């Protein structure tokens, strides 16, 4: 049974296995920055601590307070999902409130749809009235995940995220 947990050093081996599956691809929702050194235990610990502390960040042009969760089943890392509490101008254009990614070996099991539903409940608890979620125009699996959770397509536009980005809004309050 999957669950959402805070990032933890205890799942480092499973996370590294997942990273190998992703290869050079960006892991959406994971909060990995180019400067992060995840190859060492110390670097991995610093990264997971940064993710846990991110909800206390101050808004800047590039960063906003965010909560990170890992999607896990027991001791197996399956993916990540992030809730950005407010949006700055950059995220309003292309990144949105929520980002997520499921490791390649765990796709096709409904994990993203389940995790998004869980995080929408947490966004409601934070007092958000609606959330913006974006995906690449050609990422049909992600589009279906968003639509299954009530996403309404606002538009498809060129953004800093992708040449063609779908922008969906999900209303959390009536």
Image (spheres, rainbow, N blue to C red):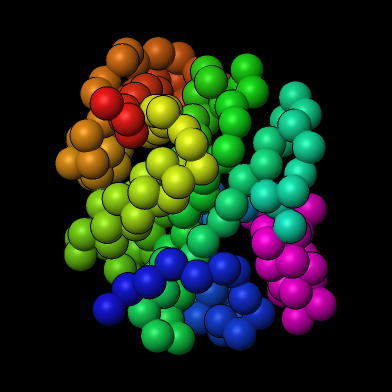
Any part of residue 137 in sight: no
Q: Is residue 46 magenta?
A: yes
Q: Position of residue 117 (x, y in %)?
A: 30, 50
Q: For residue 10, say whether it is visible.
A: yes
Quadrant assignment for the N terminus = bottom left
Residue 114 located left or right of residue 57: left
Q: State the image coordinates of residue 68 (x, y, percent, origin top left).
A: 57, 56
Magenta residue check for 156: no
Q: Looking at the image, which residue is at 40% across and 13% down?
A: 157
Q: Residue at x 21, y 59 (%)?
A: 110
Q: Position of residue 64 (x, y in %)?
A: 68, 36
Q: Quadrant of residue 148?
A: top left
Q: Say above or below: 171 vs 56.
A: above
Provide the residue span drawn in magenta.
32-52
Q: Position of residue 122 (x, y in %)?
A: 44, 50
Residue 168, compared with residue 101, is above or below; it is above
Q: Residue at x 79, y 68 (%)?
A: 46
Q: Quadrant of residue 145?
A: top left
């Amino acid at each position: 049974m999957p669950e959402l947990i805070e990032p933890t050093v205890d799942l480092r081996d499973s996370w590294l296995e997942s990273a190998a599956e992703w290869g050079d691809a960006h892991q959406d929702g994971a909060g990995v920055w180019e400067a992060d050194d995840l190859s060492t235990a110390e670097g991995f610990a610093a990264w997971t601590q940064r993710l846990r502390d991110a909800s206390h960040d101050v808004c800047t042009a590039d960063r906003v307070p965010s909560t990170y969760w890992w999607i896990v089943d027991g001791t197996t890392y399956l993916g990540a999902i992030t809730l950005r509490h407010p949006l700055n101008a950059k995220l309003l254009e292309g990144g949105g409130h929520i980002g997520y990614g499921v490791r390649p070996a765990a796709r096709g099991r409904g994990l993203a749809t389940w995790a998004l539903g869980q995080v929408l409940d947490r966004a409601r608890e934070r007092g958000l009235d609606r959330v913006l979620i974006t995906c690449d125009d050609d990422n049909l699996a992600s589009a279906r995940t968003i639509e299954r959770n009530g996403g309404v397509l606002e538009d498809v536009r060129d953004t800093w995220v992708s040449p063609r980005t779908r922008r969906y809004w999900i209303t959390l309050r009536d």
